[in-house]
Image (tube, rainbow, N blue to C red):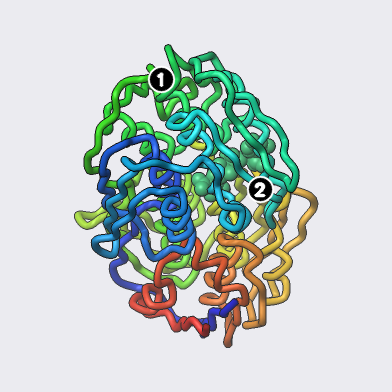
Amino acid sequence: MGQFVVAGGRRLAGAFEVSGSKNAALPILAATTLVAAPVTLKGVPLGLSDVQHMLAMLRELGVRVAPASPSRVTVDASGPLSSVLPEQYTRAMRASVFLMGPLLGRLGRVTVSRPGGCNIGPRPIDMHLKGLAALSVRFDDRPGGRIEGGGASLRGAVIYLDFPSVGATENVMMAAVMAAGETVIENAAREPEVVDLAQFLNAMGAEVHGAGTDRVWIRGQLPLHGGCYELIPDRIEAGTVAIAAAVTGGDVTLAHVIPEHLTPLWRKLTDMGVEVRPSAEGMRVSASGDLAAASLRTGPHPGFPTDLQPLMLALMTQAAGCSTLVETVFENRLRHALEMRRMGANVLTDGRMAVIYGPTPLDGAVVEATDLRAGAALIVAGLAARGTTVVLGADNVARGYERWAERLSALGADVILDP
Ligand code: UD1
């Protein structure tokens, strides 16, 4: 499992180079199975365990994978591919469902295991299945929680998503690229990673319009070709470091960041008294005085990103007054609040809502990273705490943060990864 050991009380300062986006890399890697030619991707966070899992899964399916540098990989899906996703991978990583759309598009059939819930909620895939079924895919349940999709060839359709699910939008988009005729996704997710996937598909010869709005339009069955594509920077990693700078009264410049991807965060940090300004190198985030309480509600993009909610909760423990936080995207995403209470945070939770009274001095404790962003938030709380915090479950953090102890330490933190 491993653990992070954080000695609190150090101020973060300096420059931080943001990695390529994990949540763009996973669907785009899956989408390479649509292309029967080599594709080179740049800015891939190859150090992440989720990305390594996706690459392992691609290899297992018959894709040739050749990593060339710490952030560049060439994948070649021109050979024969299997349509069956190995169960050990689908169980280990939820993002394996991203392979459903492209494999249905490329091969006309797919077999996956139904992913289980995870620590932030049940996370069903009903919208993925409904969207793909609208493209004429028939799904049958098989023993052992397997689902088999196939049937007639894919036909374009108009699909309305009941919620702007990121994964369902991406899956349908990838399948629709190979469907006959046109597909329209209404109430589509508008996240920057959805836009990045559309741009990747278009760079390979597809025609996807409207990504970034709630109506995405795809013309199917255009011939795809190989090529080279660079992923967007990881807005959640950037946001995590910005919040870590703020909680330590630090001064950090984020390089390789697209500021518009994080508008809600910059606004909220500014409301709380943190100085945020664009600089020649990127975005500079500095905090010197007291932090003010704030209220925030997560929501699909362009709302406040749910993935930064746990981090904001850590920051709010250090803000003067009563902060409130409402999680609208996931059902069970406040477990980190209970862990932070062990560090002395004054937090009350009720269902999807948390009320945080601050500022409260935090004390180091042994806490558990119940999921990826909860783990990141506990490390950030540890940076602000007196004494030593041990964050158990380091493997959860390694899913989404590359060389994390090393990169935080380069900013002046005292963090080690104890394997
Ligand atoms: C993606 C991100 C994740 C982020 C989330 C919301 C990746 C790899 N992960 O996850 O980091 O927190 O977007 O921004 O990109 N839902 C259903 N049925 C479905 C699909 C989703 O009920 O078929 C529900 C989920 O349980 C959740 C909500 O819809 O409550 C949002 O999920 P979704 O937008 O699909 O998130 P992911 O794509 O799984």
- Mark 2 lies on residue: 115
Q: Quadrant of residue 395?
A: bottom right
**Image depth: mark 2 or mark 1 in front:** 2
Kindly tell me whether residue 40 is visible in this rendering. Answer: yes
Q: Circle 2: is it few (<14), some (14-19), or many (20+) Cα within 10 Å?
A: many
Which residue does the image show at 63% across and 35% down from the upper left? 148
Which residue does the image show at 62% across and 77% down from the upper left? 392
Give the image quadrant in which the ligand numbered 1 is located: top right
Residue 246 % position (x, y): 45, 65
Name the residue furthest right.
350
Q: Amino acid at mark 1?
A: Ile
Which mark, by number, is residue 218?
A: 1
Above or below, 180 relative to 360: above
Of residues 49 and 62, which is closer to you in this image? Answer: 62
Of residues 375 and 274, which is closer to you in this image? Answer: 375
Q: Secondary structure at mark 1?
A: strand
Describe residue 126's horizontal placement relative to residue 101 as left or right.
right
Q: Amino acid at mark 2?
A: Pro
Which residue does the image show at 67% across and 64% down from the upper left? 336
Label 2 beta carbon less than 8 Å to ligand 1: no
Q: Quadrant of residue 181?
A: top left
Quadrant the N terminus occupies: bottom right
